[in-house]
Amino acid sequence: MSVTYTERGQGSALADFLSEKAQVLSIAFFFVVCVAFFSIATDVFLTPGNLLNVLRQAAPILVVAVAMTFVIITAGIDLSVGSQVALINASAALTLSFGVPWPLVVLAMLLLGAAIGLGQGWFVAYQGIPAFIVTLAGLSILRGAALYMTKGYSIPITDVPGFFVLGRGTLLGIPVPAIIALAVAAAGALVIGSQIYGRRVVAVGSNPEAARRVGMPAKWTIASVYMLTGIASAVAGLLIAARLGSGSSNAAVGFELQVIAAVVLGGTSLFGGRGSILGTILGTLTIAVIGNGLILMHISPFFTQIVTGAIILIAIWLNTRIFTAGFSFRRKPS
Amino acid sequence: MAASSALQAVDPEGPVPSGQPQVPRISLRGIRKTFGSIEALRGVDLDIAPGECVGLIGDNAAGKSTLTKIISGTYIADSGSIAIDGEPVSFTSPAEARARHIEMVFQDLSLCDHIDVMGNLFLGREETRWSFLNNASMRERARAMLDDLDIRIPKLTAKVAQLSGGQRQAIAIARAASFEPRVLIMDEPTSALAVAEVEAVLRLINRVKARGVSVILITHRLQDLFRVCDKIAVMYEGTKVAERAIGDTSLEDLVRLIVGKGEEI
């Protein structure tokens, strides 16, 4: 009697690709559906002017969402980004009103954002306090600081045309904020995908103890991602100040929820280890398109919030049902 | 024979079985470690010569894993001293132990599920060019590392989460063994491996021993010990109760020592 041995065939590369990229594909599909729907439902949506407007408005969310993707990949969360944006927004307007040159203000705000983020990161990484708690406290403290500084008033910014270019200018017809946001996203994708720092972020999110055991600077890596959201929030605060020409402690209320929704919609797992910048870009654009489209359809802005929330829930639900193979909202039992 | 073994058990400073008066590669003295109210280690002494393989055996919770984690810098001992090649060291992090070429295969494997096979093999020592991962070079070396150990993993870009338990264990072993270790600690390295892979690991141990690497092997497969080990250290309730040269012991003897009836027989 002869025994034959056969090798197991390699699985189809297409199936591997589909399960690997399930999240990104599903959010891409959902994005296309939204665009198609609003293109048919309204006359204005698919005009170049409106699309550029969507990009301009989505830019601050995208900048912070890219940094938030890093934080969520480490299995953390940063709830304080909206308050950080408000604090930077108000501080920028105040310092500009004192007559400080605007490039100096931009630099100072970026440093302030980095310092705030690093402070929160220190509590999370080196003191072991859950990120949820640290940044929830940050949300309250930083918003309070912004209110205290401005006494609740909106601070006008006047006569700094160079600064206004950041928010209102265009380059080759494309809004400057959109260019900045896409540059940040491209840099983020490069870092997470092919740089040593990105590998450390993924490793720390996937298995922190393993990262420590192989000698990676695990704690510093965790602290540093909060510095990234701090810097990104500073960029967003400056973009918003430059677009609106004023600084207000009431800027960016609810911003953190939009950012987190965009990241999660893009398929980044809240339990760490996996995430994609491309998904985050698509998630951000989807949220921006929904917000814009509903306004164009003359639906009450109060209703918009309900619809946005419901659509996020449904999109993620469909994602889990249709693409169960690749979607891991829970950690795999190990 | 029983008398001489008992003597050796109480006198760890005695001659190593190979009889060479050389400086031990690694030398532990009076290692103690407490977790809360539990005394995990109650003063353990152990010497391992270069190129020697020590089998560390004992019942569950005897302190085997804790001892090896102290050597690899994962835990810090409460008291006691460690010397490597005669030089006293005190590790405060796994990175410091790794810098001294002490490598460990952890029982939980310590792999990152979301990173591919190649990334896990090079975890913590990625090759970079201007801070970018040098994937081409790592891919080539990863393939060579796996071939060296007869590990069959078709796709280096597969995420580790997709692999079988045995394949995951094989990756953890390849990672520890492939970067010129001087001390190689293996905590239950073969528990999920198939026959051919166990053979490959035992061959690997004999090969690295020949290069002068000291090996600490924790295993419940006692028959494997007789294939690779030079001596056996038996742990019981946080102490080392016996140390036997491999030629002076037998399977039955080891079983008796593990279950704690060594003295009565």
Image (cartoon, coloured by chain):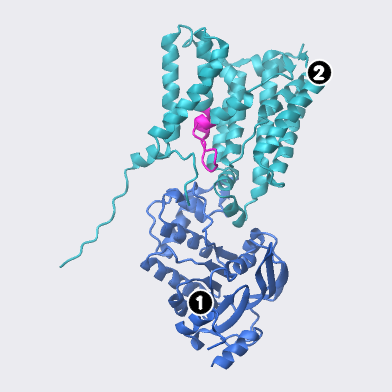
Chain colours: A cyan, B blue
Name the spot of residue B57 as percent of width and height, x first.
53, 75
Q: Secondary structure at mark 1?
A: helix
Q: Which residue is identified by label 1?
A: B210
Q: Nearer the viewer, residue A84 or B103?
A: A84
Say which residue appears at 67% left-offset and 48% top-offset. A219
Tell me the kind of residue under disc 2.
Lys
Q: Which residue is identified by label 2?
A: A151
For residue A313, side relative to residue A223 (left or right): left
Q: Secondary structure at mark 2?
A: loop
Say which residue appears at 43% left-offset and 24% top-offset. A30
Say which residue appears at 77% left-offset and 29% top-offset. A108
> The magenta stretch spans which residues?
A264-281
User: Label 2: few (<14), some or many (≥20) within 10 Å?
Assistant: few
Q: Nearer the viewer, residue A36 or A306?
A: A306
Say which residue appears at 65% left-offset and 33% top-offset. A229
For residue B21, side relative to residue A273 (left or right): right
User: Do callouts 1 and 2 point to residues on the same chain?
Assistant: no
Q: Residue furthest left?
A: A1
For residue A201, side relative to residue A44 (left or right): right
Q: Pick the quarter of the image with the N terminus of chain A.
A: bottom left
Q: Is residue A45 above or below residue A25?
A: above
Q: Is residue A122 above or below residue A290?
A: below
Q: Residue furthest right?
A: A98
For residue B170, side relative to residue A210 (left or right): left
Name the spot of residue A69 as percent of width and height, x first.
57, 35
Is residue A307 highlighted in magenta? no
User: Label 1: few (<14), some or many (≥20) within 10 Å?
Assistant: few
Nearer mark to the viewer, of 1 and 2: 2
- Residue B189 numbered mark, or none: none
Q: Quadrant of residue A205?
A: top right
Q: Nearer the viewer, residue B147 or B10?
A: B10
